[in-house]
Image (cartoon, coloured by chain):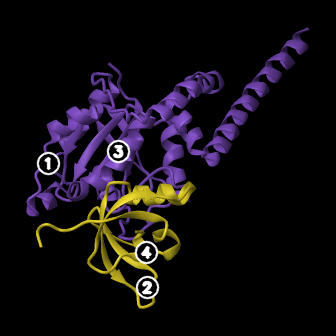
Amino acid sequence: MTTNEVYRIALAGNPNTGKSTLFNALTGLKQHTGNWAGKTVSLAEGSVHYKKNTYRLIDLPGTYSLYSNSTDEEVARNYIVFEKPHVTLVVLDATSLERNLNLALQVMEMTSNVIVCVNLIDEAKKRGIEIDELKLMRQLGVPVLKISARNKTGFPALLDTIDRMIRGEISTSPYAIQYNDETEGKISQLVPNVKKLVGDRFPSRWIALRLLDGDTSLLDEIQKRMHQEEESTWNTVQKTSGSHLENF
Amino acid sequence: MNLYEGNKGDRIRIKEVAIEGVMRRRLLDLGFVPGAVVDVLKKSPLGDPIAFRVSHTTIALRKEESIKITGELIQDDNE
């Protein structure tokens, strides 16, 4: 068992799902929550201590999607794919699951360390909406928890689930969308080549899908990141060979 | 018919979104997907933009987009 470690937990969700309210309730920070689009532009960070571990929470911008290439969406997408948080919490609005699940499915294509929080559960109850979280959990293949960030209900179970996911006690099998035969055929053609280029650094099926989407901004970003990586390796090589020369 | 031709009160089931690239993605994310049913809520005085109800939210579209989304009028059996 690990102790005294710092783990990064990213919060993703549509605008107005109470993502920042959850962030504030957990971290005790007074990050201002607003009610208009693009409120959370930069990434707010705060910490929670639980069972000797520290969770660094990162509040990603609220978005409906991760693919429309607005700055907000790029920031959220890049964080999940490139910074690889230990856990990504996807916060859903219980009163409009249909719209909210779009983002959840997108995140689940990028990483398997996903926990779905169905928030505003008190509001849903008022409107006569019942959420069957066990059924959702079975269908999505990731933990689903009902919470009310405003009333701070459901937090112990949420923190416990995060803890167990970090310790590797929960194995998820995120629901993978099956596309039509043509798309699936192209994906299986692309995946081996993508793997050759990026290895296990990034999810290859997801990158193949973005290639088919013609997402050039993602390609630029990958190229930039891999270039930086190469440069830093090269610098280390130079340093070591330099010291070798001195020895010689 | 396309969404731009819809009249206030019409319910239209989307068949095709003939838009490419980022705007297509945005429309799909907002719920304008083939098979979805949208209601025509309001038209502005000059008919552009038009407000639609799609997956429990009101979204206004410009003519450029609404004219490229096609579908069929559906009869409401409840009325």
Q: CA distance from mark 2 to mark 4?
A: 8 Å
Disc 3/disc 4 C-alpha distance (Å): 31 Å
Question: In the rendered structure, are the residues bearing label 3 and label 2 in contact, judged by CB atoms less than 8 Å apart?
Answer: no
Q: Secondary structure at mark 1?
A: loop
Query: For the residue carrying disc 2, how many other residues have a C-alpha within 10 Å: few (<14), some (14-19), or many (20+)?
Result: few
Using the rendered view, name the quadrant where residue B3 is placed.
bottom left
Residue A63 in sight here: no
Distance between the alpha carbons at the discs numbered 3 and 1: 16 Å
For label 4, the crowd category at 10 Å Cα-Cα, with few meaning under 14, some 14 to 19 and many 20 or more, is many
Residue A158: x, y in percent? 23, 40
* Relative side of A107 to A16, left or right: right
Mark 3 surroundings: few (<14), some (14-19) or many (≥20) residues within 10 A: many
Nearest the eye: B64 or A32: B64
Q: Which amino acid does the dot numbered 1 rest on?
A: Ile
Numbered disc in front, either 4 or 1: 4
Labels 1, 2: one chain: no
Q: In terms of secondary structure, where does tag 4 sit? A: helix
| Residue at the spot of label 4 | B4
Of circles 3 and 2, the one toward us is: 2
What mark, if any, has residue A104 been given in the picture?
Answer: 3
Which structural element holds mark 3?
A: helix
Label 1 sits on residue: A131
Contact between labelled residues 4 and 2, with CB atoms less than 8 Å apart: yes
Q: Which chain did the renderer colour yellow?
A: B
| Front: mark 3 or 4 | 4
**Residue type marked 3:** Ala
Spot occupied by residue A246 in the image (x, y as percentages of width and height): 90, 15
Q: Colour of chain A?
A: purple
Q: Identify the residue under disc 2.
A: B47
